[in-house]
Amino acid sequence: MSVSSRIISRMSGLFLFVFLISCSSESEQQQGGPMNQNAVIPAVEAVQARYGSLPLVERFSGNVRSENQVPLFPQINARIEEVFVENGDFVNKGDRLVKLQDEQLKQQLAQAEAGLKINKARLRQAEAALKELNARYNRLKKLAEQELSSDAELEQIEAELTSAEANFELAEAQVEQSQALVNERKENLNRTIITAPISGTIGQRNAQVGMQVNTGTQLFLIGDLSKLRVEIVLTEEMLNKISIGQSATIHVADYEGNDREISAKLSRISPFLNEVTRSTEAEIDVNNENGWLKPGMFVPVDIHFGESEQATLIPVSAIFTDPTSGEDGVFIASSIGTEIQPVADDNSDSPQALTEPTPVKFIPINVIARGRMEVGVGGLESGDWVITLGQDLLVEGREQARVRTVTWDKVLGLQLMQREDLLKEVLQEQKSSPQQAATL
């Protein structure tokens, strides 16, 4: 038996006991006969089983992220001088977000530029010395060809020329090194202005004037809130039935707790499974123009992947676990005819529609397909009246009950109720009932 079935069944017995017994007592008194002190006949609710197929739905817990969601970190270590944005501000790509203190970086740039000038001057000196030695070498070489100069003099000038060439190359390298340092200092100075890398909305601001930051300090999170992405985790087994393009329903509660649905499609599935968890990620692209979703939210996500085979359908709340045998089954009221009109509106002021004492019995079932609100079962026929509320009142060997027939919409609505809503419903029923519960 599913957890939701147990919860609904136990809640039914706990919160509706007073209401159901009240209905039973009232029906006895309306018939004019005294109640049997040894055989209290409980009141229950029932709905007709129907034939059909179940939509096959798998529910996941989704994590909402904005499309192109980007954390922003400074690229240098410095202290914050100005902050230009607040949480919730929309910014365009290139807008200024933060200014870091730059006095020290300006000084470092000035020093680097001075060093570059010095090295450029040394390069010019080395170049001039090299030209002079080249001219002397050429003159001495001509004299040597005319035997007007000795070989020793030629060898000496060649050595000096080689040294001058090395000095020139060293000066060139020093200029390149100084130029690179100047470029680095300029880049660091530019990094004191942190700009938006994309257009989007600012969030998770962690920037205050005077705050010391480093390259590991996240200052903001920025993303496009109009285009969100819901991430879900798929197990290896789920990949056999979940595929790209299937319909997805994202559930979002409003400020009053009411469920709102967003329809979308499964956009993509990662083909690589985690070697440890044997799971992978899937993503659903969502247009968030209504603003219902926020990045970081956890939301229920239903993926629809087909329909079950035709079977007899009953509400989840009809399934009951026998406390003695542990067997799953349902209570049925076999003698109710189709002339009974189910009650659809709990807010009606008219007396509750209860049958005469009707035989009820517990029948084991075989669950063929399971949905969130309904299950397909074997062992029942379409049209059978199954007890959906008050099963706990029948477990002590009671073979009869007064049945209040209800519609499917009423049962499904009750299953959607939260615990607090259900309690309010019971209290409202008790207030509207013409007679309070009697002492049995």
Image (spheres, grey):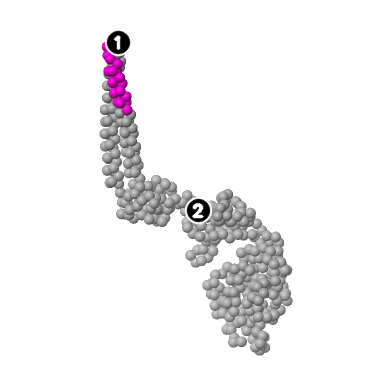
152 in the magenta segment? yes
Q: Quadrant of residue 323?
A: bottom right
Q: Tell me which segment is drawn in magenta.
A: 146-166
Residue 91: x and y, percent?
41, 50
Residue 214: x and y, percent?
36, 51
Q: Residue at x 66, y 62 (%)?
A: 54
Mark number, residue 305: none
The residue that mark 1 highlights is 146
Q: How far apart are marks 2 and 1 (CA)?
A: 88 Å
Q: Residue at x 39, y 50 (%)?
A: 73
* Type of amino acid at the residue the image marks with label 2: Leu
Between discs 2 and 1, the one toward the N terminus: 1
- The image shows residue 43, relative to residue 203, as above or below, that is below
Mark yes or no: residue 321 visible.
yes
Q: Is residue 298 left or right of residue 54?
A: left
Q: In this view, does 10 lie to the left or right of 298?
A: right
Q: Residue at x 56, y 50 (%)?
A: 272
- The image shows residue 387, relative to residue 115, as above or below, that is below
Q: Nearer the viewer, residue 291 or 311?
A: 311
- The image shows residue 404, relative to residue 114, as above or below, that is below
Q: Would you say the magenta stretch is mainly helix, strand or loop?
A: helix
Q: Which residue is drawn at 27% across and 40% down?
A: 111
Residue 309: x and y, percent?
70, 60
Mark yes or no: residue 263 visible.
no
- The image shows residue 280, relative to residue 41, as above or below, that is above
Q: Nearer the viewer, residue 264 or 409?
A: 264
315 in the magenta segment? no
* Type of amino acid at the residue the image marks with label 1: Gln
Residue 241: x and y, percent?
63, 55
